[in-house]
Amino acid sequence: MSLAKQKAYESVLDKLKHFINDKQLQPGDKLPSEREFAEQLGVGRSSVREALRAIELLGLIETRQGEGTFLREYQSLSTVRVLSSFILQEQHTVEEVGDLRRLVEKEALKLAFKQTRQLVSEQWLQLFTEETTFDTDHHYLFFQVVFKNIEHPLLQKLWHFLMDFSHHTDFIQYNKEFYQDLIYIFKHNTIEIIEDLYEK
Amino acid sequence: MSLAKQKAYESVLDKLKHFINDKQLQPGDKLPSEREFAEQLGVGRSSVREALRAIELLGLIETRQGEGTFLREYQSLSTVRVLSSFILQEQHTVEEVGDLRRLVEKEALKLAFKQTRQLVSEQWLQLFTEETTFDTDHHYLFFQVVFKNIEHPLLQKLWHFLMDFSHHTDFIQYNKEFYQDLIYIFKHNTIEIIEDLYEK
DNA sequence: ATGGGTTATTGGTCTGACCAGACAAGTAAT
DNA sequence: ATTACTTGTCTGGTCAGACCAATAACCCAT
């Protein structure tokens, strides 16, 4: 039926995906050489390269001439840099990304509240010094604490992605009270208040 | 100093960026052919292809054999989709995807409640016939109504993606009462109840 | 053991070839 | 004149081979 014929480089990506999965490869591990992989899959080396270049641009792999191709820790920064350099201001998506980011943050806060309420609030307090500036970087650190303490890699990755996007397009604006309220809530209040905090 | 020598396909991407900018190309417009572009830039066609394949994977362009390469409307989540197919290889994420899906659905419900409460509940009622089965397909239709009525493409795309994933890995199980409760809430209650419904 | 040169391997790049899909112009049949 | 077919020429899709550049592995002389 309506099966769009898959391109060679796309099938290479699928195979690569399986390969990584089967061999349980970790970041830093070496992938097969381009020539070897091409022969294994029965495709041309150029097709393998197209696939590798694509995910290299995504920051998923790193290639070193003379050495090989290596799995990399996901660096969403590079992705965002590439994307935002192509996408000139799409106004509505910027806003929508912000919505989604706040949504994810809120849910993460609730998880943190349930799971590691005490631990998080302690680490938060350490973030505040005399000269704390409440900019995007501070926001990042603040929620970094949250995501590091909850067990939810997917939520964390999504958040990172959304943060990077915001970083390059918009500024994150919460006032000082927002963070102070959160700390107070974690110390004294109940979880329902978090919802209220985000309703405004 | 620290100029890491740029790869050919990366310089192609830069040039392409400028090209799009200079010519003020819009989504749907045609890019130069691979051969022509290669000659213009003084690089091989394979390098041009590596660049194009990379941003094709990002969903920035669309190629049609025999016709050419065309600029595409930016699909912000196509990136996430690609990344996810690589990142979501760990087993424990099936559950996490479910979490995220419920999160998105809940937020969408709240939006729908605020924006098009009446319209949604009317359309919901039409979904229930005598022989309604409460399976994944029904769940899809039920929330399809929600997402079609709220103005949030990003949330909608993310939900679609998560639904696709759930479809292939897990089944979505809510009992009949869940949907009936929602309809009742939209008719008679206040928005806070939605939160309660998801807490159980 | 150590240093240095040689060799093999890997990615980086280009070229040329051929296939397949799309399309327009030209041509033959009606 | 209209229609249907053929052909040429665009386009991307793919492959094989060649060569360069950088690194790693090896071997040998010291």
Image (spheres, coloured by chain):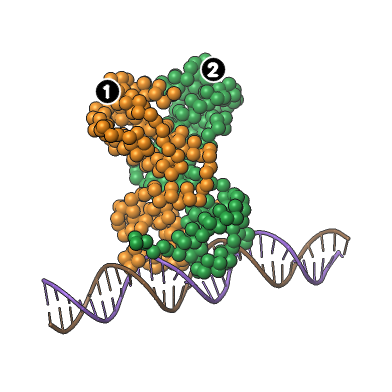
Chain colours: A orange, B green, C purple, D brown
Q: Residues within 10 Å of mark 1 (few under 14, many from 20)?
A: some
Question: In the rendered image of this protein, does residue B106 appear above or below residue B20?
Answer: above
Tag 2, which chain? B
Give me the residue at 40% from left, 40% from top: A163
The furthest residue to the top: B188
- Judge by depth and name the residue closer to the eye, B64 or A85: A85
Q: Which of the image's four quarters has the C terminus of chain A?
A: top left
Label of residue A187 in the image: 1
Question: In the rendered image of this protein, does residue B11 appear above or below residue A120?
Answer: below
Label of residue B187 in the image: 2
Q: Is residue B165 visible?
A: no
* Residue D26 in picture, x, y percent from top left: 22, 75
Q: Secondary structure at mark 2?
A: helix
* Residue C10 in picture, x, y percent from top left: 35, 67
* Residue A115 in picture, x, y percent from top left: 28, 29
Label of residue B7 in the image: none
Amino acid marked by disc 1 = Lys
